[in-house]
């Protein structure tokens, strides 16, 4: 669970944004990559399944994960949530 996983996800799914973030200073990259990876995960939720209910479940999972982060509770392990919580 590292920034590398976030970087790979953004590079694969949003190459323009990846190139832009790589031009940023290192400290900014550490903050931007998890946010952009989160964006990729949420944006693709409706497209990974043909079932609307499954897409809603995926989005609810992300809502719950963000609530854990916001409340300072232990965060579920995921390649994006762990760096995002940092």
Image (spheres, helix red, strand yellow):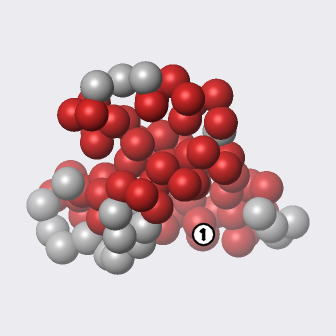
* Figure quadrant of residue 77: bottom left
Which residue shows up at 51% across the image and 24% down it?
20
Q: Nearer the viewer, residue 44 or 5?
A: 5
Q: Is residue 43 in sight in this rendering?
A: no
- Residue 19 in which image quadrant: top right
Asked whether residue 70 appears in the rendered view, the answer is yes
The N terminus - image quarter: bottom left
What residue lies at 36% left-to-right and 23% top-to-bottom? 24
Classify the position of the C terminus by image quarter: bottom left
Which image quadrant is residue 29 in? top left
Horizontal side, residue 48 vs residue 64: left or right:
right
Q: Is residue 5 left or right of residue 14?
A: left
Q: Give residue 31's position: percent from left, percent from top.
A: 29, 39
Measuring from the top left, give residue 10's x and y in whole percent: 56, 46
Residue underneath mark 1: 57
Q: Residues within 10 Å of mark 1 (few under 14, many from 20)?
A: few
Q: Residue furthest left?
A: 72
Residue 82, horizontal then vertical, whole percent: 30, 65
Residue 23 x, y percent position in the rendering: 43, 23
Image side of residue 86 versus residue 7, left or right: left
Q: Which of 19 and 78 lies nearest the eye of the viewer?
A: 19
Q: Is residue 68 above or below residue 40?
A: below
């Amino acid at each position: 669970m590292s920034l590398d996983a976030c970087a790979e996800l953004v590079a694969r799914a949003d190459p323009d944004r990846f190139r832009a973030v790589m031009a940023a200073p290192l400290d900014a990259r550490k903050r931007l990559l998890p946010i952009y990876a989160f964006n990729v995960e949420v944006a693709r939720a409706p497209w990974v399944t043909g079932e609307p209910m499954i897409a809603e479940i995926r989005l609810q999972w992300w809502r719950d994960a963000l609530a854990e982060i916001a409340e300072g509770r232990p965060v579920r392990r995921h390649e994006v949530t762990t760096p995002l919580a940092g």
